Structure formats: structure tokens, C-alpha cells
Image (spheres, helix red, strand yellow):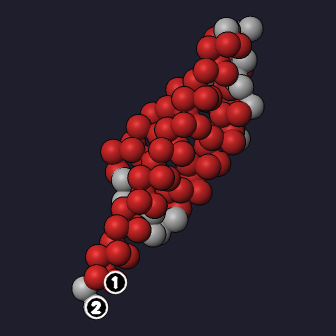
Amino acid sequence: MRGSGIAVLSTLASCFHFQGAVKDPGADRARADLSQLQADPQLASRAPQALKEAEDAVNAAEVPQKDPALSTHLVYLADRKVQTARALAEAHVAEDQLKALQGR
């Protein structure tokens, strides 16, 4: 019971801290896309730097902002970073498949 009280107080404190700030709902979509990419065993390890950059961008997009335009921009950047990480990982998979085919 005590731990849940701390969680409630923490949540209330964060609400007051970000009073008037808005989190763009697109941040949840970017997080879901990133999580899906990270969970894919064929892609997750193929572009570690791009995945790190995508994670950082999604984290930034999830922070509520007072300026809706800034929030929208951060979500846009997060989406692009996730798409870039996916594209790089898929390219590395394709390169490995091509090498395997050429080696036959």
C-alpha cells in the first residue's frame, strides 16, 4: 500500500510540473513502432547506432511540451529516426542475404 501511495504522489507531482504541457499522441505510435523494431530478432541488432538515435528521439517526443508545434516536431523527428533505423536494419539484412546467395 505504501508503494502505491508513492506512485500516486509521483504522478501528481509530474502533473503539476507539466501543467499546461501536452504530449502529442503520435509519441505513443512512435514508441510502438520502435518497440516492434526492437523486438524483431532479425532487425534489432543490425543498426545499433540508428536504434539508439531512434530511442533518444522517441524519449524526447514523449516529454510533454507547452508548445504544440514543438511537440509535433519532436514526434516527426522520432518517426523519421525509427523509420531510418528500420531501413538501415533491413538493408543490412538484405546485404547479408545477398552475400549468402553469392557464396553458394
Q: Quadrant of residue 70?
A: top right
Q: Left or right? Give the position of 45 relative to 70.
A: left
Residue linked to disc 1: 101
In the rendering, which numbered label is found on residue 64?
Answer: none
At x 53%, y 62%, the residue is 39
- Quadrant of image for the C terminus: bottom left
Q: Position of residue 51 (x, y in %)?
A: 42, 46
Q: Residue furthest front?
A: 102
Secondary structure at badge 1 equals helix
Q: Left or right? Give the position of 40 relative to 8.
A: left
- Quadrant of image for the N terminus: top right
Q: Quadrant of residue 72?
A: top right
Marks 1 and 2, how far apart at CA:
5 Å
Q: Is residue 30 above or below residue 22?
A: below
Amino acid tagged 1: Leu
Q: Left or right? Give the position of 82 relative to 10.
A: left
Amino acid tagged 2: Arg
Is residue 16 among the parts visible in the rendering? no
Residue linked to disc 2: 104
* Contact, mark 1 vs mark 2 (Cβ under 8 Å): yes
- Circle 2 residues within 10 Å: few <14, some 14–19, many ≥20: few
Q: Position of residue 103 (x, y in %)?
A: 25, 85
